[in-house]
Image (cartoon, rainbow, N blue to C red):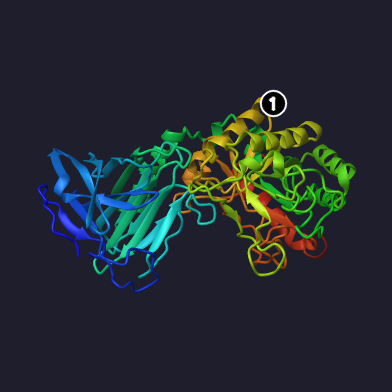
Amino acid sequence: MQPKRANPAGLRLLVSTDGVNTPPKGAALMKFSFSNPEPSVDFGGLQFGFEVISFENAYGVDPAQVSVRRKGDTLELHATGFTWAGGTRTRAGSLTATLTRTTTGAIEWTVAARLDQPIKAIKTIVRGLPRGRLSVGANDWDDVGEDERVFEYPALMGGMATPLLAIEGKDQRVWGISALQTEVRPARFAFFPGPDGYKVELLYEQAGWDRRGEVTTCQWRIASAPDFAGVARPHFDAVRAAYRLPDFASRTDAPGWMKEVALVLSLHGEHWTGYVHNDFARQLEILRWTARQIDPRNVLIFLPGWDARYYWDYPEFRIGADAGGEMGFNRLLTEGRKLGFRFALMFGSNIANPAWPGFDRIADAQVRTIYGAPFASDYVDWDGDRKGDTTMVFMNLAVKSWRDHLRGRIADMLSRYPIDAYFLDICGLWENNTAGDMMLGTRMLVEELAASHPAVPPIAEMVYDAQMGFIPMNHVTRYPLYPQASFGTVASFDHLSHPAPGRGSSGVHEIGFRSYRPVRPDQPQIPTITFVDDTFTAFRDLAMRDIATARQRFAARGQRT
């Protein structure tokens, strides 16, 4: 039973189940099994509540110890104490939330909290937003129905490459919720449907390597507009300013050849099992044939599986003997460059096999969560036992030992072979951890390699917004509902699992087979053709057709052919 408490500021004494379907009518998130107090204040037509989460418990503001001051378009809520255990106990601490209504009608706010123990996260609880379809990180609309859902930025697999979530109401008006960050931190968006609208929880998580009892959130913003562009534009303008994102056409870290790529050939080498899709001799044969179909100066050759068993031999990053060894590899690159092709070599930016003999030298860089536990790499079933394998571990480029090792291996290959770009596999992974900012570690690696090899740019897999400032090309496009935010900043081509012509093999990638999708003249991303074991022998006609379409697409854009 929750005791009655004084409420001098006249807050709405709401509880967690108010306005929410209880029990849920669809898929449910974990939550407290009682109605937890969520005292809230009215501002701008919405209701705002706040909560502080430590590594031990969750604390709400004590309505008996809250003052609210309104002045013009600003509201300041100040709490000098918290309640916990469903409002039955109190604890010392403070919280200040400052909310402002901007001249454009948006609501912006920050929350600062203090506790006598490290703060893990600060939650804002918002009521009054409509039900409707959701767009997560400017991805396509999704009708989640009655399901409770939570989304997190940055998310490699979920595709939340920028902390923007939009709701399309029944009147087609769009509401945008943004975390306006200036440094990469976890931002979570949890949606709880009710009869009349959503209850939304917005969480800012403190850096795991900087535990403290005094934390201030990033700036949050809620705004509405007649269409998606109306909420996306100010969000991406803020992102561009925060991370100094350049226009792709004027990027100095994107060499001229990168701006004239009409086609990417993904030539798959050795699979995790040791099966070789294309050895280096076959790859050279493919290039000689391709040179008769399109100007090689407009073609980038992407090489996954060049370094022995795909993934298993990470982080050795040495030329695979079964695919042709150093002699075959050198001949492929030397002859390919004479034809005019450009080459990008694949490296794993943050994953390694602990069975590698030198792992002890980099073991301190293994990613650990904010709780200090190893961050599992168990999402791939490599061996077909129908369960995710834990043979690999995630690594943190913010840790010097790993960054030095990876930089050394990349620099060695760049020094010895005519390589035009290096690809950073899983670059878009960011996990809150105890050792340091994975984004800053990635940027340090790129800067260090730029100092020794200034003409060789990085390419990333699945970048999030902040990385676009220092990586000019991306593997997997972002923001389909607002593509100018991606294509205006970086060049993009298809993922290495892009289905090969014919049966749709994903080559060395773990996904297996998917439906083949021919190149389209109107596609925004650079056309990509995957070459696996049977592409050149059985489906050369489909590859030829895709090359012709890519050439036509390139010419239609007025680029050099």
Rendered position, 219 above or below 497: above
Q: Nearer the viewer, residue 554 or 537?
A: 537
Disc 1: which residue? 452
Instruction: Tell me: 112 left or right of 136.
Output: left
Residue 231 visible in image: yes
Occupied quadrant, residue 332:
top right
| Image mark count | 1
Instruction: Tell me: 44 left or right of 442.
Output: left
Residue 527 visible in image: no
Q: Residue furthest right?
A: 327
Instruction: Tell me: 6 left or right of 276.
Output: left
Q: Residue at x 82, y 57 (%)?
A: 276
Q: Nearer the viewer, residue 330 or 442?
A: 442
- Quadrant of image for the N terminus: bottom left
Badge 1 amino acid: Ser
Q: Nearer the viewer, residue 537 or 437?
A: 437
Spot occupied by residue 61 in the image (x, y as percentages of width and height): 23, 49
Occupied quadrant, residue 200:
bottom left
- Quadrant of image for the C terminus: top right
Occupied quadrant, residue 444:
top right
Q: Nearer the viewer, residue 152 or 463?
A: 152
Spot occupied by residue 10 in the image (x, y as percentages of width and height): 11, 51
Rendered position, 478 above or below 488: below
